[in-house]
Image: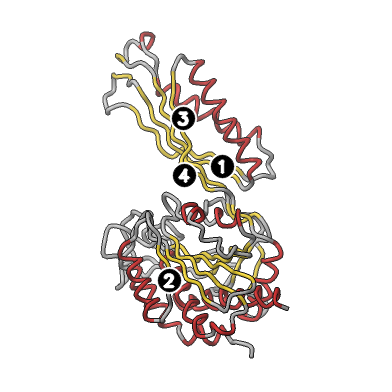
Amino acid sequence: MKIDFRHEAQEISEEIVSWRRDLHKIPEIGLVLPQTVCYVKERLEEMGIAYRTYEGHSGITVDLGRGGGRAIAIRADMDGLPMREETGLPFTSTNENMHACGHDAHTAILLGAAKMLKAHEEMIPGLVRLIFQPGEEFPGGAEPMVKDGVLENPKMDYILALHVSNKGKDYINGDVVVSYGNTSASDEQLYLTIKGKGGHGASPDLCIDPIAIATLVINNLQYIISREVSPFNSSVITIATVKAGNGANNIIPDTAEVIGTVRNVDLESRNYVITRIREIVDHTVKAMRGDYDLEFKYPYPPLVNDRRVVERFLDAADRVLGEGHTHIMARPEMGGEDAAFFFQKVPGCYFYLQCPMKSEIDGKAYGVHNSRFRLDETVLFLGAALFAETAFELLEDEAG
């Protein structure tokens, strides 16, 4: 018997929306999400689904199916962002954080998939493991969960994940966009402290000016992008914060702090750019008689899809959405995505669900990480259907 997951997901669409709105009110950040994890556990218990929790973070995993065959992991992130919401929605955040990246929707979608898969558990020809992950935004919850063995016992054969998105006017809400390969960039956070020698602004010759050194470093780093990296490879160095001095106009400070982000779509480019940053910082600072501390924190590798898994996903998506609603990405995203830690270990498919919604305040559609970000809840059920349909596609393909 073929299961109509689109129909079943549509039947629970209002429930998925309700879960999403409940989660939207209680956004939490980091690896420990006490309210969020309590809410997810309560919903799973209502469905009669057993789950596993972990020490040190709020991750949850669920195993469904008969076992004995292939194993598919499906991942959703649960955390929010440290920013105040300005949507004016009736279910707006009740604290100082905001679900401005749609992870509340991802969690609700995975709960919807859980409900459908549980209803057909005896038909699952293998195992489906649901991964509810904290800390995607910061400091990265996927890597700790990998270390906790969530991809083992049994070893996962494939993995699926999604993100709500706005890919532009060429798509309608409910469409999906996916890449056959490189999908998101590596992401390193750069922290540089330049150490000079402070003094009076009228006597710069008696000082070692860390601000002057910082400007040279910032300028020189951009030559990596414009003159050393192939124009056919996507790389970004963005210096987002420079801190120095105390507001006075005649004091040269002792130190200057430079903070930024480095993005690359492949590991070869990433390794080259990081090496060159270290060399340029070292040579520039020392040439100006200064010293420095340089650190790269919270690195996410690039996320790369597996072509074969993507092809199986596209077959499933055509059944769920109908033909003409799947699209191939022309280029990878430069945003970082810590699901890449899962995808380094297991071949998989990470896709985007088109669902922008205009703000009722000014009629504009805002992207993720904006305080006025909204999404079209009416298509969230499609995410749950796509997860379930693709899981069966992969399991039955191997079983057959």
Which mark is on residue 51? Answer: 2
Residue for badge 4:
298
The amino acid on which the numbered mark 1 sits, given as a three-letter code, is Val
Q: CA distance from mark 4 to mark 2?
A: 28 Å
Q: Report how many numbered discs are placed on residues in the image.
A: 4
For the residues carrying marks 4 and 2, which lies nearer the camera in this image? 2
Label 3 or label 2, whichever comes before in sequence order: 2
Q: Secondary structure at mark 2?
A: loop
Rendered view: 157 above or below 290: below
Label 1 or label 4, whichever comes before in sequence order: 1
Rendered view: 120 above or below 206: below
The colour style of the image is secondary structure
Q: What residue is rendered at 35% in x and 57% in y?
A: 32
Label 4 or label 2, whichever comes before in sequence order: 2
Q: CA distance from mark 3 to mark 4?
A: 14 Å
Residue for badge 3:
294
Residue for badge 1:
236
Q: Secondary structure at mark 4?
A: strand
Residue 20 image point, x, y percent:
39, 73
Q: CA distance from mark 3 to mark 2?
A: 42 Å
Residue 254 image point, x, y percent:
34, 20
Rendered view: 392 above or below 212: below
Q: Secondary structure at mark 3?
A: strand
The amino acid on which the numbered mark 2 sits, given as a three-letter code, is Tyr
